[in-house]
Amino acid sequence: MTKVVNINTIVLIKRINYKKGTAEDLTKRNTRDDLFLAAVKIFAKKGYKGATVREICKLAGAANINSINYYFGGKEKLYKAILEHIFSDYQNRKDKHENAKQKKITPEERLRDFIYTYCDMLYSGGKISADLSAIFIAEMSRPSPYINEMVKTYMIPQAEELIGILRDILGQHTPLNIIRDCGVSIIGAIGYYGFTLPILSRIFSDLSSMKSYYKQLSEHVFRFSMGGLKAVKKALATSQIPASKNKKNMGC
């Protein structure tokens, strides 16, 4: 039986390989895993400043409060390890998905895969995904000192990937501001469900769990996005959208 961390709020779904940022399906875990998962729960609930080492160790069932120093080098580095996992998760899932396909695909198929990978990342893990999303949202509203490193290492490559896909669909000379707005619209359609699920689930009874819905959401966002991109491409061809004067690619 899978061990539960103290209370029935964190159940191990995957064991994290902290050095490579990958995840492997296992049925048992160690003290390091327990501390990591407990920290996810506490940071999601109380934020970085509100969380204490003592609380994390108690939830993890670790009697020694120095356990976090031993396994991670302190609370600060534990929080960074969680951010590394959150921000690297897309690339890890993408690599696994691409290795499974191993064939050339069209820009439209690449967009479908991009959307599916994001939905899978955000919603396939159930409760633990919700806690990781809460930490991500908090990081967006109150950035930690690690945000620049995370953006440079993970977010800029993801943005460049989506920009490349959208340029291949809309045309290589499409102004960057149009590409950016299309990309933000796509990501926003995926992420909105995560931000507003407590409200949406009270309005729509079929949305009690994103884990059972994310594949359907992925296909919807893809179809909706393709319709929007078709409209944008037509507007560009008929000069309904003014060209941007900004020639820069990205500002980081």
Image (cartoon, helix red, strand yellow):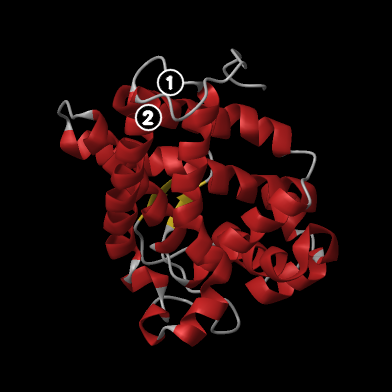
Q: Residue at x 36, y 26 (%)?
A: 238
**Image position of 149 with respect to 76: above or below:** above
Note whether residue 63 is visible: no
- Which sits in the foreground, 233 or 220? 233
**Image position of 29 with respect to 113: above or below:** below
Residue 142: give x, y in percent of width and height. Answer: 79, 51
Residue 113: give x, y in percent of width and height. Answer: 29, 42
**Image position of 156 with respect to 200: above or below:** above
Rendered image quadrant of residue 59: bottom right
Q: Which numbered dot is residue 58?
A: none
Q: Residue furthest left?
A: 103
> Of the residues shown, which amino acid type is indicated by label 2?
Leu
Rendered image quadrant of residue 27: bottom left
Q: Residue at x 50, y 86 (%)?
A: 202
Identify the residue under disc 1: 174
Circles 1 and 2, Cβ within 8 Å, touching? The answer is: yes
Identify the residue under disc 2: 166
- SS under mark 1: loop
> Of the residues shown, which amino acid type is indicated by label 1?
Thr
